[in-house]
Amino acid sequence: MIWRSSFNSRFAVIADFLTAVLGFLVSYSIWSLLYMHYSPTFPKPAPVSLTFIIWAVVSGYIYVFLFKANKAYSYQRFTSLSTEYSIVLRVAAIGSLLSLAAAFFLNLTSLRRTFFILLFFDVFILYILQKSLLYYFAQQVRKAGRNRRRVLVVGTGERTEQFLSVVKSNFSWGLDVVGLLSADPDMLNKEIKGIPVIGSFSQIEEIIKTVNPEEVIITISTKKFEQIRDILESCDKVGMNVRLYSDFFGHITKRVQVDNVFGLNLISFGFNEQSEFELFLKRIFDIIFSLLFIFLLSPILLTIALVIYFQDGRPVLYRWQVMGRNRKPVTSWKFRTMVRNADEVKEKLLTNNEMTGPMFKMTDDPRILPFGRFLRKFSLDELPQFFSVLKGDLSLVGPRPPLQTEFREFDLWHRRKLSVKPGMTCLWQVSGRNGINNFDDWARLDLEYIDNWSLWLDFKILFKTIPAVIRGTGK
């Protein structure tokens, strides 16, 4: 949210809840209008019942929960409209799917796909309008001198100048810098960017009493830990929030978490910025869709197994030993597309490897069975991996796992591929796997996926995978 006070946070929660409910009313009204004017094309609207009303209210809470999970109600005075819009897009997409699930559990079978398509677009548009209005209103309120925040800045160096420049160019953030503190006594009474230096670090407690700031922002180098610790202890006495404009972490980490474990203060550095809530949703989608695919494709699975058995006997499945998340060994399964002693023959074919790096690729691999070429062209050999997705060893979308033998030849930076759960499809597959002959390029696509991961990206990759598989270009 664009302000912090408890009143405004509560107001934002109520506004988001009512917007969701309004989205349901608008979607139902449009559905009714479409039926009235285009009844042969659009189905008859479901009757409004008590269960329908309960479902709408439950779904309203779902949207609020999703906004909270995306930290929309936490302190984000420095947010932008683009950030707000990206949150809205995620919430609208995930909320529509969860509302569909809630309708299923409430046995609202009369609701059709038409309604849920309308729901996504209506909720998305209404939330965009709501967030834009609130953002504009907050800007005008702050420009008028209200809802502003008094901050004391610790530091007078280059980082301080950068911070003050950004604050001055974003007046609508509502930050009023009341003064600066410096470790250099010669800086006293001087000004930086029009802000006076009003004291030294050692005087912070007296300065807090005098100017009464609401927040302290530290812009000095974290190499000066002793001074920073003293400042933190002084602010702790008052119960004042402190923010650190730090050069310590650089660009090497995306998440820092401090835990107190039996009196031990432990700082955790996360190098993959992945929301636990979104990972939980990803797992739910993996379970639902893998079960759905296994059920729908079961006749095809049985047919392929019989063809392989009659063509080349047992085993029908190939035991696929790969490396999973956090570089742990995983056993999965594929339909066997090669001769039984394929791994032994591979040693004799290594000189024909067309891939630069640890992976093996050969266009006319003599080990592949006639029916196996067909399975590989359309990725049908990988269908048994849906059972691994259901089990939790793989995901629908994620970096492709390497064989355990190939993993031993990975460079250090290649291994970050396995900091997340591997999957059945990823960017490399929808980017034209046949045209990639350098393993480094393959690995860079996987790292690009990791660095930009979101549920929305997973959906886009899945949608792109389907036509790639149908055309036979996904493998």
Image (cartoon, rainbow, N blue to C red):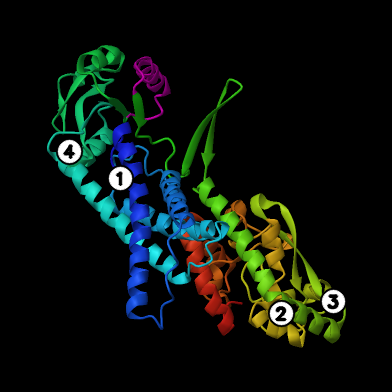
Q: How much space separates mark 4 and mark 1, taking CA atoms?
A: 14 Å
The residue lying furthest to the right in this view is 313
Q: Which secondary structure lies at badge 4? A: helix
- The reply to whether dot 2 and dot 3 touch (C-beta < 8 Å) is no
Task: Give the label, 4 or 1, closer to the camera.
Answer: 4
- Depth check: give the residue in front, 350 or 152: 152
Residue at 58% x, 74% y: name it: 437
Task: Give the label, 3 or 1, closer to the camera.
Answer: 1
Q: How much space separates mark 2 and mark 4, taking CA atoms?
A: 63 Å
- Depth check: give the residue in front, 286 or 266: 286
Label for residue 340?
3
Task: Give the label, 4 or 3, closer to the camera.
Answer: 4
Q: Which secondary structure lies at badge 2? A: helix
Residue at 50% x, 73% y: name it: 464
Which secondary structure dominates the residues rendered in magenta? helix
The disc, 4 or 1, on the residue closer to the chain's N-terminal end is 1
- The reply to whether dot 4 and dot 3 touch (C-beta < 8 Å) is no
Label for residue 300?
2
Q: Within 10 angstroms of label 2, few (less than 14), some, or many (20 or more) residues?
A: few
Q: Quadrant of the C terminus?
A: bottom right
Q: How much space separates mark 2 and mark 3, taking CA atoms?
A: 22 Å
Label for residue 79?
1
